[in-house]
Image: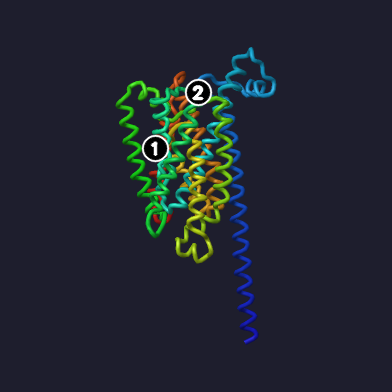
Amino acid sequence: MSVSTTQQRSASGSAEATTRSGLVEGRRTRILGLVAAVVVLAFAVVLSIVLGSKSLAIHTVFDAMFHFDRNDIDHTVVRELRVPRTLIGLGVGVALGLAGAVMQGVSRNPLADPGILGVNAGAALFVLVAVHFFSVTTLLGYVWWAFAGAAVSAVFVYVVASVGREGATPIKLALAGTAITALLTSMTNMVQLLDVRTMDAYRSWAVGSLAGRDADIAWDVWPFIAVGVVLALSSARMLNTLALGDDVARSLGLNVSRARIICGLGVVILAGAATAAAGPIVFIGLTVPHIARAIVGPDYRWILPYSAVLAPVLFLAADIVGRLVVKPAELQVGIVTALLGAPVFVALVRRRSLASL
């Protein structure tokens, strides 16, 4: 008996050591992968500043950053056009990636993106109202109206989904979001048909673009994005628990309603700020969390950081492509993200069943 017990303990200790070693190795691999993604993001940031309708040398960019000369046109292009544009693209990418990952986690729906809360539809309607009724014509003016619309519509969706004894379940959130998005989109189309001038002004924003965005917009949206990032990253454990189902989450001591409110607030802030700054951008928030999940598995403690890094890489790459393919004109980044994101998402769906995601 003693020999058998000793052998069992030895085998158990060996299994525990193997498991611990595997966890350490997996953690190291994920950290190295995240560092590599950050390096790629830094490279994308540099390319976003260097490349455009007029390509600039690295030393010119360096001089513009550290030895700025207002009389040098290249320096002005770098400091007043490309750096703010890159910063906004970086922030929008981070916001959309995190918002999409949190939305998929809180709704337990692999096809969810920020639009499920009516964010894009609410922002679009409020921008249209600003143009039509208040003659707002500046991008800076659009930012605040779009952000307000995103927040109001998301709160409205949550209130509607909360009606009833079960509260805001994932299915009810999805249904309420779909219904209210359809309603808001119909109202938006109606206003456009009533006023051609409004339709023309709105169309340039609704296609999704970073062109013409200046430093003022970057200063306006980055504080919101920073708050949203903190909320999103702090929700990782809650999302892991919610993934087990509401009943199991409650048995583990999680306040499900409170968790959904915190996660939803993060999504509203992130997606609202991104939509306000760049217009409605599709597929980034939908596709990138799937890429992150394919790399690191179902743990949101890793999915969220990876999404926050990979999304701006894809977004900045799309913006760079849009600037280069039709030089000296420009293809809006919203169009490029749709063209790039749709095939990637289709490939992911074909590779893995939605049930496993």
Task: Name the secondary structure under disc 2.
Answer: loop
Hey, what amino acid is under mark 2? Gly
Furthest toward the bottom, the residue is 1
Which comes sooner in the sequence, label 1 or label 2?
A: 1
As drawn, the residue found furthest toward the right would be 67
Mark 1 highlights which residue?
121
In the image, 342 versus 188, the foreground residue is 188
- Contact between marks 1 and 2 (CB within 8 A): the answer is no
- If the image is split into quadrants, where does the N terminus sit? bottom right
Crowding at dot 2, Cα within 10 Å, few <14 / some 14-19 / many 20+, comes out as few
Can you see residue 139?
yes
Seen at 61% across and 44% down, the residue is 35
Asked if residue 17 lies left or right of residue 122, the reply is: right
User: Residue 153 placed where, x, y %?
Assistant: 42, 41
Q: Residue at x 62, y 82 (%)?
A: 5
**Disc 1 from disc 2: Cα separation:** 23 Å
* For residue 66, side relative to residue 19 (left or right): right
Q: Nearer the viewer, residue 11 or 240?
A: 240
| Label ID, residue 180 | none
What residue is pinned by disc 2? 212
Residue 43 lies, in percent from the top left, at: 59, 34
SS under mark 1: helix
Viewer-nearest residue: 16 or 115 = 115
Residue 83 in the image, given as x and y percentages of width and height = 58, 26
